Image (cartoon, rainbow, N blue to C red):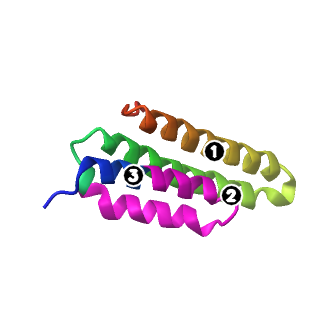
Amino acid sequence: MLPDMESLKRLTAIVYGLQIASFFVGITFIAGVIVNYVKLKDVEGTWLESHFRWQMRTFWFGLLWSCIGILLFIVVVGIPILMAAAVWVLYRAIKGWIELSEGKPLDF
């Protein structure tokens, strides 16, 4: 039995919320990407698949830039990298949430 689109849309919004909440409780970022991978099959072929892919890319690239920032923290260059990564993750979570609320798929 396939989950209905409304519950998948709600789940997608929850993942965006988890991404934003990760600024306060970091573990929610990981929880969100786990939800993406577990439910990916349910959204394949729908407009919500673009949101799941967007969310997964946000996680992986956010993690990559955060690790680079942490490694370069000692030489002070890491501070602006970490700040830029945080702004980028926040931008993508907000943009995705807005597009989701308008019922639009994301282009990447």
Q: Does the magenta stretch include residue 79?
A: no
Report the magenta stretch's main SS.
helix
Question: From the viewer's perspective, is 2 left or right of 16?
Answer: left
Q: Of the residues shown, which amino acid type is indicated by label 1?
A: Leu
Above or below for 25 versus 42: below
Q: Earlier in the sequence, mark 1 or mark 2?
A: 2
The answer to the question of whether label 1 and label 3 lie on touching residues, with beta carbons closer than 8 A, is: no
Helix, strand or loop status at disc 3: helix
- The residue under label 1 is 90
Question: From the viewer's perspective, is 53 left or right of 40?
Answer: right
Residue neighbourhood size for the residue with mark 2, other residues' Cα within 10 Å, grouped as few (<14), some (14–19), many (≥20) = some
Provide the residue span drawn in magenta: 13-41
Q: Earlier in the sequence, mark 2 or mark 3?
A: 3
Task: Tell me the quarter of the image containing the N terminus.
Answer: bottom left
Q: Of the residues shown, which amino acid type is indicated by label 3?
A: Arg
Which numbered disc covers residue 23?
Answer: 2
Between the residue at mark 1 and the residue at mark 2, the CA separation in whole angstroms equals: 9 Å
Which numbered disc covers residue 10?
Answer: 3
